[in-house]
Amino acid sequence: MRHIMSPLDFTVEELDQMMDLAADIEKNPEKYAHVCDGKKIATLFYEPSTRTRLSFEAAMLNLGGSVIGFADADSSSAKKGESVSDTIQVIGCFADIAAMRHPKEGAPLVASMHSNIPVINAGDGGHQHPTQTLTDLTTIRSLKGRLDNLTIGLCGDLKFGRTVHSLISALVRYSNVKFVLISPEELRVPSYIREDVLEANNIEYEEVIRLEDALPKLDILYMTRVQKERFFNEDDYLRMKDFYILDNEKMKLAKEDMFILHPLPRVNEISVEVDKDPRAAYFRQVQYGVYIRMALIMTLLELHV
């Protein structure tokens, strides 16, 4: 039995197989419509989510399975003080697989250590968000046809953004990937990512403050929002939240075949006028998220067509 706590839990070869499966699901959805007949996924969301929770639910329903779970901690026994380890052992009596989002780093890992069903980390604090990373990799591969020989720009909240940390860790395993890290000084990527991931793997990267300086050289621009919920100080958040706004004027600096990704939700960092640009791929990214979660569920449950 396998769990997924980090995108690094799968080898590059396993990820490629999963992305191949996602691509086949996209082309032939009817072929997979009953592969999870009789199976249930439990979505255990101790923290609010729209995309991730509904994406898991859509994925399981598309495979013919069903869904149980809760959408916030207040509607679970956590409010009464039940531990994560007890909760997952109870859930194992009801469901075949679980997806857990939790504000505390490591909570899904604790659950996996006490679980008799596969556990998927659906986001733990500012730590990891592996299925968003699988979504991002699938989207980039689908749009660009490859995951190597790319220059990736990551813009916005690089300090608290778990999607950014996970994506960097996953992409360094592919050859000739370069990063341009675009952020204000206060939201720079943490030193452990810089030293233990980028420098330890001899990955070429540069840190810049101005988005305009980075745009002309990028194959992919990954925008992120400044996350209010990660700030302790409201004034700091208000000062940072509109630091970057991507609009049509800035898009004139970008390559014709550069694509914009965003884990969503967005606030102000991408102007709605950019939505009409064919390079805006963030809503397609959501759709790819359903396909790769379908592939992940099948992989962890060892189901084949």
Image (tube, grey):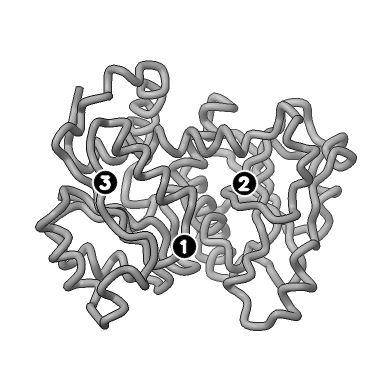
- Spot occupied by residue 264 in the image (x, y as percentages of width and height): 59, 50
Q: Which residue position is annotated with label 1?
A: 48
Specify few, some or many for label 2: CA neighbours under 10 Å numbering under 14, 14-19, or 20 or more: many
Specify few, some or many for label 1: CA neighbours under 10 Å numbering under 14, 14-19, or 20 or more: some
Residue furthest out toward the right: 249
Residue furthest out toward the front: 75
Tell me the amino acid under the disc marked 2. His
Residue in the picture at 56% in, 66% down: 195
Residues marked 3 and 2 touching at CB (< 8 Å): no
Tell me the amino acid under the disc marked 3. Val
Q: Which residue position is annotated with label 3?
A: 67
Tell me the amino acid under the disc marked 1. Pro
Specify few, some or many for label 3: CA neighbours under 10 Å numbering under 14, 14-19, or 20 or more: some
Q: Which residue position is annotated with label 2?
A: 262
Residue in the picture at 27% in, 31% down: 63
- Spot occupied by residue 113 in the image (x, y as percentages of width and height): 19, 66
Closer to us: mark 3 or mark 2? Answer: 3
* Residue 101 appears in the picture as rendered: no
Ranked by sequence position, the earlier of labels 1 and 3 is 1
Marking on residue 222: none
Ranked by sequence position, the earlier of labels 1 and 2 is 1
234 relative to 52, above or below: below
SS for callout 1? loop
Tell me the CA gap for discs 3 and 2. 27 Å
115 relative to 239, above or below: above
Relative to the observer, which residue lies in front, 288 or 50? 50
> Residue 155, located in which quarter of the rendered image?
bottom right
SS for callout 2? loop
- Spot occupied by residue 211 in the image (x, y as percentages of width and height): 81, 51
**Looking at the figure, which quarter contains the C terminus?**
top left
Relative to the observer, which residue lies in front, 82 or 14? 82
